[in-house]
Image (tube, grey):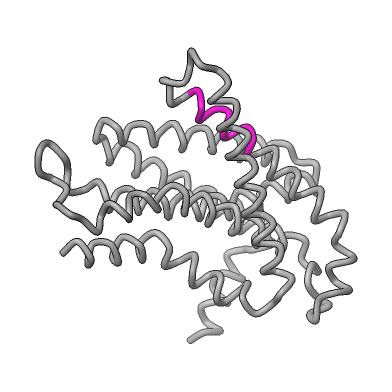
Amino acid sequence: MTLAEFFSCSLLAFGAPIVMFAMTVATDPVRIIIMIAAAFGWLLSFLLSSLVWYAVVPLRSYLIFGMIFAIIFQELFRYGMYLLLRKTEAGLKEISENHEIGSNKLEMAYVSGLGFGTMSGAFALVNVLADSIGPGTLGLSGGTEYFFVTSSAMTLCMILLNTFWSIIFFSGFDEKNYLKILWVIISHFFVSFLSLLNSRELYAASILPSYIVLMITSYIAFRCAGGSSKTFIQSFSARS
């Protein structure tokens, strides 16, 4: 039973990102490089926030303290990826077999965001998945059987949010529309703070608002990428 739980939770959290990677990133070496670079950028932001948490001894016991600096560093590195990709855009087209790469400026934002989100999801869930294999079953001795599935659902939410946040973030700087950037930062703080409710087993109070934010963010990202209700309908009619 524990092995089944491991695979079900793994697929819940990483199934959609794996499909997104296979269909949109894996076919182009340059996109893979961008995704790896973004994942490495997230790792660096995590390292810096860890150093700050370690240095400030009196506040180590407060989880929210470390979370605030983690979000700040993540957004700074997201901006760093924006600058890096915009400055190397022409060079990436030259070395890529697909010379149309970057013709849509938000294409690289999507790949970068997917790398950001995948790495954050891996760090958030890898230890939880390791515990799900056993021995023992969660739910005994005061635990809850919903811990693994809610952790997986929250991880999926954060992976997708990071992908959409990067699209909105890049679009905001390209258009100098700072309301978009503000939405990314505020919603990032909001969803991250909601996750603190999980320590009190208030899973519905954290997951439901987080997925509402995800739906709103996905719509904004869709519009930023040039989508409309007409193109949305056409995308389904073309597949049928």
Q: Is residue 197 left or right of residue 175?
A: left
Q: Main secondary structure of the magenta part?
A: helix
- The image quarter containing residue 61 is top left
Q: Position of residue 28 (x, y in %)?
A: 69, 77
Outermost residue to the bottom? 240
Q: Quadrant of the N terminus?
A: bottom left
Is 68 in the magenta? yes
* Residue ID at (48%, 86%): 240
Q: On the rendered structure, is 96 left or right of 35? A: right
Res. 71 image quadrant = top right
Name the one closer to the observer, 168 or 11.
Answer: 11
Write the residue at 43% across / 47% down.
Answer: 124
Q: Is residue 51 above or below residue 229?
A: above
Decide which of 181, 96 is in the foreground and name it.
96
Report the magenta residues as a range: 65-74
Judge left or right: residue 141 versus residue 99: left
Q: Position of residue 226 (x, y in %)?
A: 69, 62
Residue 11 position (above or below residue 22): above
Residue 74 drawn at (x, y percent): 62, 40
* Residue farthest to the left, as pictured: 140
Q: Tell me where residue 13 sits by quadrant.
A: bottom left
Question: Residue 202 appears at what percent x and percent y?
Answer: 26, 35
For image coordinates 56% across by 84% down, the residue present is 238
Looking at the picture, does residue 159 appear above or below residue 111? above
In the rendered image, residue 169 lying in the magenta stretch gets the answer no
Q: Residue at x 66, y 54 (%)?
A: 38
Q: Residue furthest top?
A: 58
